[in-house]
Image: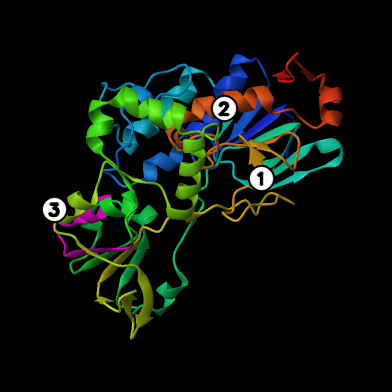
Amino acid sequence: MKSQRQNPFTIIIGAGHCGLAMAHELAVKGEEFVVLEAGQTPGNSWSSRWESLELFTPAEHDGLPGKRFPAARGTFPTARAVSEYLRTYAASFQLPIQTSTTARRLEVGLGGVFRVQTDRGLFEAGRVVVATGVHQVPRIPPLSTQISADAMQLHSSEYRNPAQIPDGPVAVVGFGTSGAQIACELAPSHRVTISGRPTSHVPEAFIRYGPALYWLLVHRLLTRSTPAGRKVAQRIHHRGAPLIRVSTQDVAAAGVAAVGRIEAVRDGVMLTQDGIPVEASTIIWATGYHPDYSWIDGLGTDENGYPFHRRGVSTEFPGLGFLGIPFQYGLASGIIGGAGRDARHLARRLDPAPAVANKMGFVPDAEGTANG
């Protein structure tokens, strides 16, 4: 396709729930913007999750700005329902989304103008919001290459349903929420082992029967503005998110055998830290993801691979913002219901580079917030 130069004021990269929340905030302000989405539809990534996946948060807290989630209170929407909701959301507000457009490179040009190289041409803007989240590169331990070729290996992102898994014992590596849920789902049809140290647990009864208190905790109390929130943020970055809607007791009741962390491979067979062999014909790596911002020229990242920012506003490049970073501001930053708060903050605080602001007539308001 012939390259075309396009110049909206703001480019949003990613039309998942974070990108759509940001698009809504800019639309309300009457600003010019475009959303670039690699998939064929908004919310495309949700359509590729495993079939039985449900959100951790009740439907009443799963809406984006301006449109509630169309499900009964106290129910937990499926990934498929979320995908449909996001498509409907984008259409309802007639958001300018260019689908099947993959951002390949982001660079800052003269005067602070951002250039986004895509497979559909070049886009330039005074501001860019990277709303791709951090689930870019599946994390699979290097020792996986030493495992016998007879074993089928897949990452949890590739798992769809039990029928996909051949007969024989299954080892789920990673005792987070995804690993525990997949292990329980496979237990009726397979002999399943789960390895790793489980994280802390948020009881489902607390979420189901005390949704208002749960939301107060994750959305208002556990933020970077509170001592408790900062402590939880550190714990999550180092140990992982808590088990939600599934517990170690649920895993044991399902008949899943729990073992320690996988530390080595001998003769093609995985060994735990205690030297226990874990034989499996299928191995599912529920080991999370690596964030990937390598396509952004000159961007620095911290020890976790996340960009340097304050509530999503880059501390390196004026006009560059991020959404979907774990605990970006609070624990709710990682779920659909928290996207609106982070997007509103960016819409108010993400100023372009001074040279771009002057050229485009961008003037801060009395509090220094964006007033485009």
Side of 48 relative to 211 (left or right)? right
Residue 31 on the magenta segment:
no
Amino acid type indicated by mark 3:
Ala
In this picture, is 173 found above or below 268? above
Mark 2 and mark 1: span between their CA atoms?
17 Å
How far apart in space, not on screen, are marks 1 and 3 (Cα)?
43 Å
Q: Which residue is mark 1?
A: 308
Query: With respect to residue 329, does 201 lie above or below?
Result: below
Q: Secondary structure at mark 2?
A: helix
Which amino acid, mark 1? Phe
- Under circle 3, the secondary element is helix
Residue 163: horizontal and vertical position, in percent?
21, 56
Where does the magenta region start and end?
181-196
**Mark 2 belongs to which amino acid?**
Ala
Q: Which residue is mark 2?
A: 343
- In this picture the colour scheme is rainbow
Q: Residue at x 50, y 47 (%)?
A: 234
1 and 3 marks in contact (CB < 8 Å): no
Number of numbered discs visible in the structure rendering: 3
Lower position in the chain sequence, tag 1 or tag 3: 3
Q: Percent from the top left, x then y, of residue 91?
A: 47, 22
Sequence-wise, the earlier of marks 3 and 2 is 3
| Of residues 345 and 161, the one drawn nearer to the viewer in this rendering | 345
